[in-house]
Amino acid sequence: MIRFDHVTKTYPRSTRPALFDVSITIDRGEFVFIVGPSGSGKSTVLRLALREEQATSGAVLVAGQDLGRLPLRKVPRLRRDIGTVFQDFRLLGNKNVFQNVAFALQVLGKSGHYIRQVVPETLELVGLDGKAKRMPHELSGGEQQRVAIARAVVNRPSILLCDEPTGNLDPAISLDIVHLLDRINQTGTTIVMATHDDDIVNDMRRRVVELSDGVVVRDEEDSLYLPKGDVG
Amino acid sequence: MLGEVGNGLRRNLSMAISVVLVTMVSMYLLGLGLLAQRQADTMKGYWYDRVQVSVYLCNDNPTQPNCQGKAATDQQKATIKGQLQQLPEVKAVFYESEQEAFDRFKEQFRNSPVVSNNLKVGDIPDSFRVQLKDPSKFAVVTSQFEGAPGVASVQDQEKVLKPFFRVINLVTLFAVLLAALMVACSALLIMTTVRQVAFARRREIGIMRLVGASNATIRTPFIVETVLSGLLGAVLAVGLLWATVHFLFNRLLSQILYDRALIGDTDVWFVAPWMVAVVVVVAVVTSMLTLWRYLRV
């Protein structure tokens, strides 16, 4: 589903590469944590997969497309197949919950009939049924992130990219959010989540890719935040 | 958060108003430039219709050497008239006697008795007044009749009008240049406005790009907005222009000048589509260029 093949990314006006010779293969339906300290290159991996940036060298393949060869006009089509969730929710403050989720479908030109059918279903999936008319500022942080997740998955993408989705939430709420992501994963959606929340990673026991200074230092199935055997 | 939205709206409203106003002023000036052009054309046509080549004939006390001190005979006059009428460039030929020339001069200078009182019949020789199909072809008449027997001199009024036309053309050119400068100004302002509006909506735009909205979906609202405010400005400019022409030119100036060589309301309607077309092109092109740079994927 997502493949990084010897990818190096150097940002302009920077001498040190943000990613160096990174190779990762993520299959359809996987749930992968990308962990590492700030500046280790987690966000760069997600930005490359979204084609917000292009690799300096190496190939990035997403949903069967070689992003290095994808013409700019086809980028929107690629992004319709990728949902994205961020630490800061990125909701529109002047729209209520329903409108925020519906916005993602409206700008794709979906019919009002379809929107009125799909949005309530999605809100129910993320546990927000009954809160469609609320404004974002009336919701808790966890609820706002559920709205953002609803917006990310309402178009049924095959991939969901999450950049520190629990970074602004307290531990209990964070676990709820990750369990919601797990439910979405069980419907077949590939999930890539960048995080440095050790509790969550340890609780979920999924594949963990650890980055350090732009290099993959660990890639293990059913793993923990810290390497197995490295206690402390 | 609501405050920010309100603030953004107010800012956009004031920017939209400034686009409308600058478009209005620049299109008004452009319209004035175009109308000045049409005014010049109207005047040229008016004067050209009256431009005549005068073939002055020798009279009883000629000063020109060609006359050899004698008046033109009736036979010479008849020959000249016949030759004039045969020229394909000539539309009409009139004979003006000394008495008629004297009367016309008296009438034209009735307000300056010093000039007209000193004139007597015979000071202005009789002449053939030749109207040409194309007034600029006067050289044909000049070359053929200058120095012919019985002809004192050939005078072309186009020569007299030329400096006057040159001034009109210069004024028109200046007006059009000024208008072009104003069009450039409004293009720059539209550019800034579009950028400002795009900045105020960066959250929406960010989300639209994230969920894979096509570039057309993202750009169309901006283009429609700028075109609409530009059109509003253009309509206001046309109204202003109409008022200028209708009240200033047709009511005021025509009373002073007693002249029909002035542009009228119809000229405004002729210029209006050009103004609207310029606005639409400028609005679409500048907002496309701005967004292309601002909203790169």
Image (tube, rainbow, N blue to C red):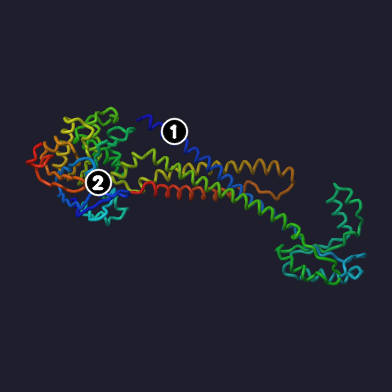
Q: Chain of mark 2?
A: A
Instruction: Give the quadrant of the N terminus of chain B.
Output: top left
Q: Residue at x 66, y 54 (%)?
A: B169
**Can residue A154 be spotted in the picture?**
no
Judging by the rendered image, the residue that carries numbered circle 1 is B10
Local SS, label 1: helix
Front-most of B195 and B260? Answer: B195
Please name the amino acid that badge 2 sits on: Thr
Left or right: residue B233 versus residue A47 is right
Percent from the top left, x then y, of residue B289?
43, 50
Which corner quadrant of the image does residue A132 belong to? top left
Judging by the rendered image, the residue that carries numbered circle 2 is A44
Q: Are marks 2 and 1 on the same chain?
A: no
Above or below B259: residue B85: below
Front-most of A169 and B183? Answer: A169
Q: Which label sits on residue A165? A: none
Q: Residue at x 52, y 48 (%)?
A: B184
Which corner quadrant of the image does residue B193 belong to? top left
Local SS, label 2: helix
Left or right: residue A102 versus residue B157 is left
Please name the amino acid that badge 1 sits on: Arg
**Can residue B190 be spotted in the picture?**
yes
* Between marks 2 and 1 in the image, the one whose residue lies nearer the viewer: 2
Q: Chain of mark 1?
A: B
Q: Are marks 2 and 1 in contact (CB under 8 Å)?
A: no
Percent from the top left, x then y, of residue A152?
24, 41
Left or right: residue B14 versus residue A156 is right
